[in-house]
Amino acid sequence: MNEFGPTLASERVSLPVKGSSRLVGLMLLHCIPAGSDAARSDLTMDNEYVRRLEKAKMKDAIERKRDMNLRKARQNAHAWGATEFEQLVLDGNPRAAVFDCDGTLWRGDAAFGFLTWSLEQGLVSRSTSDWIDDRHRAYRAGQVDELTICGEMVQIYAGLQEQEIKAAAASYFDEYVRPRYFTEIVALIGKLQASDVEIWAVSSTNRWVIAEGVGDFGIPAERILAAEVRIEDGVVTSSLIAVPTDEGKAEALRQVGLARPDAVFGNSIHDLAMLEMARNPFPVNPSPALFAAASERGWGYFMPSDADADEAEVGGEQLPPRTSDPGSA
């Protein structure tokens, strides 16, 4: 169990340990006749150990380079204070404002949190639970793309009554997400609502969870663009309607007539496409990949006071090439 929900089995990782038996084996290597099966087997084991060690060193070097690049980016990027951020948004006189949800309205990943919580609650079969566990493990390893995994995380509930899923989403959200709203974002949306700004929520998280949350922000159901499947006679199917992520978020906005939103707020690289289409893009609690992209484009960013830097990183992130001219905030 972690702060944002249960721990998925694939999160519990066992690392190889170099024990005393390994050392004894290496010490005895010279006592084994050259060319024997035992010698070849031990050499093979030793080579495998060296390969693992080199792979770990390469990964460490990549992470150090990424951290160095982020430090350089932070030196060039402008962090908005709470007052400056709010004033920038309001001074833009937006008629329509678009918000991502997980990591932007609240801390953490509610999609993954609800997934692990619902599996623990037994909402799906053991075989389905094991399957999505393996799929999410592959996603975090970069072997399954964002669009696919977000769709599958909704499809696994096929065959259940929608009312059952809605009730589950309400229980999960109330316990794990509602206490994690970003204070400054709550206040900002309240002021936007008071000025009759049209507020939209766009997310690759399932619609049941998103609808449960954004209602607190006064966002009506018809202004929610989230991952969803068809419902037939009250039963969840596996037929996908939409999975707004990456360019799919920008396309979803264009389909509802928001080809150039006045203000867009997002926290991850999966929000970059819709941030780029905005008149005023506002990165909030940016993940490392979005931070790098925002810095390259000359955008500022806002870090809420109750944000957790350790939760900023988002799975499946890779920095895409720059596709358009930046907006200005």
Image (cartoon, rainbow, N blue to C red):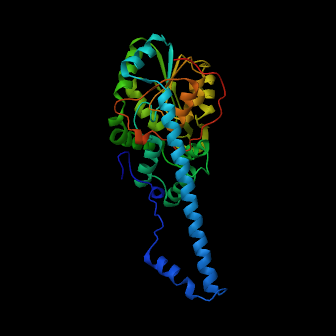
In percent of width and height, residue 171 lies at 36, 42
Q: From the viewer's perspective, is residue 45 above or below residue 267?
A: below
In percent of width and height, residue 5 lies at 38, 48
Q: Residue at x 39, y 20 (%)?
A: 188
In percent of width and height, residue 6 lies at 39, 52
Q: From the viewer's perspective, is residue 178 above or below residue 258?
A: below
Q: Residue at x 43, y 13 (%)?
A: 90
Residue 87 vs residue 152, the one in the foreground? 87
Query: Is residue 208 left or right of 145 when viewed as pictured?
Result: left
Q: Residue at x 38, y 16 (%)?
A: 191
Q: Residue at x 33, y 42 (%)?
A: 175
Q: Is residue 166 visible?
A: no
Residue 144 vs residue 303, the one in the foreground? 303
Q: Is residue 90 visible?
A: yes
Picture quadrant where residue 52 is located: bottom right
The count of marks equals: 0
In percent of width and height, residue 170 lies at 38, 39
Picture quadrant where residue 40 is located: bottom right
